């Protein structure tokens, strides 16, 4: 992590932008507080690219939760069967 004053940042912006682009965390300190410098392209890429769901993994997890519920009567992640069936129908319709 690199911490710089706002004066130093203004004088060497290209250097600190390059550091942020390379993955370095850059914090700019001023009288009003501290600010973290992050490349927008990285954040925009994450926001625009939806995470692909692993339906098989989700169904397996749900089945394990059901098994735990049937064996113990308790489950931290228990979801009603109707909710799971509705979600599977929604996925199938896509």
Image (tube, grey):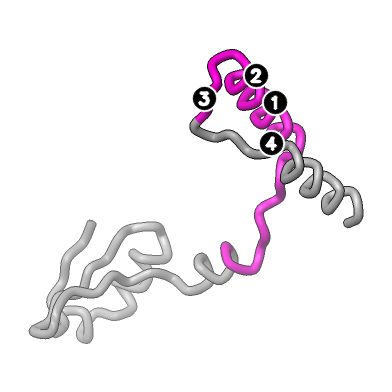
Which residue is disc 1 drawn over? Answer: 63
Image-based side of 8 in relation to 77, left or right: left
Label 4 and label 3: CA atoms lie apart by 19 Å
Q: How many marks?
A: 4
Label 3 and label 2: CA atoms lie apart by 10 Å
Work out whether residue 56 or residue 86 is closer to the camera in this orientation and state it.
86
Which residue is disc 3 drawn over? Answer: 74
**Badge 3 density bin: few <14, some 14–19, many ≥20, Cα 10 Å:** few
Which residue is disc 4 drawn over? Answer: 58
Indicate the quadrant where residue 15 lies: bottom left
Q: Which mark is residue 67?
A: 2
Label 2 and label 1: CA atoms lie apart by 6 Å
Of the numbered discs 1 and 4, the one sitting upstream in the chain is 4
Work out whether residue 7 or residue 40 is closer to the camera in this orientation and state it.
40
Q: Residue at x 24, y 74 (%)?
A: 35
> Mark 1, mark 4: which one is toward the viewer?
1
Label 4 and label 2: CA atoms lie apart by 14 Å
Label 1 and label 4: CA atoms lie apart by 9 Å
Residue interval drawn in magenta: 46-75
**Badge 1 density bin: few <14, some 14–19, many ≥20, Cα 10 Å:** some
- Secondary element under disc 2, as helix, strand or loop, is helix
Residue at the outermost front position: 73
Of the numbered discs 4 and 3, the one sitting upstream in the chain is 4
Quadrant that contains the N terminus:
bottom left
- Secondary element under disc 4, as helix, strand or loop, is helix
> Mark 4, mark 3: which one is toward the viewer?
3
- Secondary element under disc 1, as helix, strand or loop, is helix
Whether residues under marks 2 and 1 lie with C-beta atoms below 8 angstroms apart, the answer is yes
């Amino acid at each position: 992590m690199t911490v710089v004053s706002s004066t130093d940042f203004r004088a060497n912006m290209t250097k600190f932008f390059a550091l942020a682009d390379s993955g370095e965390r850059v914090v700019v300190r001023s009288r009003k507080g501290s600010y973290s410098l992050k490349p927008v392209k990285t954040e925009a890429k994450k926001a625009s690219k939806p995470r692909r769901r692993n339906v098989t993994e989700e169904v397996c997890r749900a089945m394990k939760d059901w098994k735990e519920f049937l064996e113990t009567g308790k489950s931290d992640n228990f979801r009603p069967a109707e909710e799971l069936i509705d979600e599977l129908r929604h996925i199938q319709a896509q």
